Amino acid sequence: MKNYFLSLLLVGLSIELCAQSTTKIDSNYLRPYYEQRVSLFKVLPKVKNAIIFIGNSITDGGEWQELLRCKKCLNRGSSGDISFGVNARLEDVLQDKPKKIFLLIGINDLSRGVPNELIIQNYTAFISRTKQLSPKTQIYLQSILPVNATFRKFTENIEENIKILNQAMDNLAHNVDGVTFIDLHSKFIDAEGKLDKKYTNDGLHLLGEGYMLWAKIIKQGRYLN
């Protein structure tokens, strides 16, 4: 039933996005740093039953083996990446059938003005492709982190869109077998609902204490077991 829901959602989103086909969307992910990272990932030693962390600069910045004391935890983050870029390199990531894959992506899509519906479609495609290429891999959808606009300029409705995407990921996790949603967002906000300043120095990326909190959430949730 849950896989049937996934198929229906893909069809429904495809129909809905037809109405947006006349709007030019910045889906370009082939930038120098992306190509550098992907070329590195291709030549690194293979790790059996690896635990993959995939996403943009926020994932890229984490020393996951040390943070989680996990030798099998591999960093497959790429600064500046978007949901299109993650899906484009997903086949390489899944080639060795990882045990688990942790996804955090979407903030750069929003910054480019990519519609929520298309980002959700990319989340759904990520799940579908993972299940096809590596059926036993456990999928963890991590919520997009909050931002703090006092440091830098964000679109006025970016936090509302973050909430919409996080709810969509939560819904996917409840309706598709083998998918778990991890709420990071609510653990990083201050009293005003912004990314707490103690975790960031630019309103978007994390300081060391932010990564320590992230690792604590994963360990306390026993998601590595």
Image: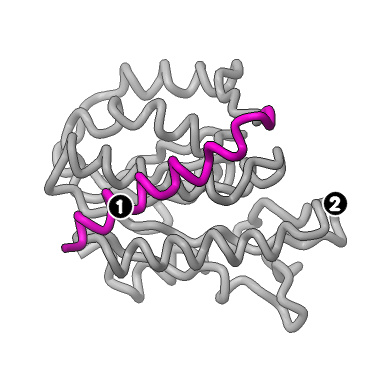
Q: Secondary structure at mark 2?
A: loop
Where is the N terminus found, in terms of image quarters?
Answer: bottom left
Position of residue 145 measured from the top left corner of the image (x, y, whole percent): 59, 61
Position of residue 112 measured from the top left corner of the image (x, y, whole percent): 70, 38
Position of residue 125 measured from the top left corner of the image (x, y, whole percent): 35, 41
Q: Is residue 27 left or right of residue 70?
A: right
Position of residue 182 measured from the top left corner of the image (x, y, whole percent): 41, 67
Q: Decide whether residue 22 is among the magenta residues.
A: yes
Task: Give the prevailing secondary structure in the magenta stretch.
Answer: helix
Give the residues in magenta. Answer: 1-24
Q: Is residue 145 left or right of residue 3?
A: right
Q: Is residue 209 visible in the rendered structure shown here?
A: no
Q: Is residue 163 visible in the rendered structure shown here?
A: yes
Q: Nearer the viewer, residue 23 or 82?
A: 23
Residue that mark 1 sits on:
8
Give me the residue at 46% from left, 62% from top: 168
* Residue type, mark 2 in image: Arg
Spatial distance from mark 1 to mark 2, Cα to Cα?
A: 39 Å
Residue that mark 2 sits on:
152
